[in-house]
Amino acid sequence: MTKKILAFGASNSKASVNKQLANYAANQLEGVEVVLLDLNDFEMPIYSVDREAATGIPQLAKDFKAHVQAADGLLISFAENNGAYTAAYKNIYDWVSRLEGTVWEDKQMLLLATSPGGRGGQGVLELAYKNYSYGNEQVIGTFSLPSFQKNFSPENGIADADLKAKLQGLLTKFQEAISK
């Protein structure tokens, strides 16, 4: 049975470098079906307990959760806004967290980040790892790609050999974990 990988960039930017990285990384895996989500397809009102009490949980939150449930593994590339998650991603997470079960359903996860700057989204990547690995042994690892425009091209992928090898090692580990 073919394994299904859910991949997305945790940004609503139409030209998201994190969506490009998530797509690239997921497509380096062999023999899997990749489902690439666009967070713009899950735009919902800003979460609040008052809104939830008045209107319930939006169908889009349920749809996002269904994608997570149908996947064997999750590959997320985080965009960093002021050292944290983007508002678009955090809002989806907040709505989905109100549904039964855990948000990520204890799926195998590989966490990535990139940015135009030299830190490559390390702040948000550290935050995500801390939050999602707590009590969850399914987080395979993290990868930061600094200086996206310098280190990545759509034609050739990651230019730096050491960075490319590091990501490949994590992808191999991720693929082995979802194959069990």
Image (cartoon, rainbow, N blue to C red):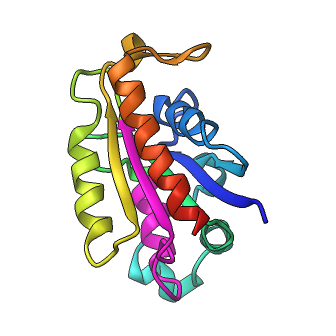
Give me the residue at 51% from left, 77% from top: 105
25 sits to left or right of 116: right
Give me the residue at 62% from left, 46% from top: 38
Give me the residue at 51% from left, 73% from top: 96
Q: In the image, is residue 100 part of the stretch drawn in magenta?
A: yes
Spot occupied by residue 112 in the image (x, y as percentages of width and height): 39, 43
Q: Which residues are magenta?
A: 89-113
Q: In the image, is residue 64 part of the stretch drawn in magenta?
A: no
Spot occupied by residue 7 in the image (x, y as percentages of width and height): 58, 49
162 sits to left or right of 38: left
Instruction: Determine whether 27 is above or below 7 in the image.
Output: above
Spot occupied by residue 13 in the image (x, y as percentages of width and height): 51, 34
Closer-to-camera residue (51/57): 57
Give me the residue at 41% from left, 45% from top: 170
Residue 2: image quadrant is bottom right
In this view of the protein, can residue 70 be seen by the observer? yes
Can you say which quadrant of the picture contains the N terminus? bottom right
Spot occupied by residue 169 in the image (x, y as percentages of width and height): 41, 40
In this view of the protein, can residue 46 be seen by the observer? no
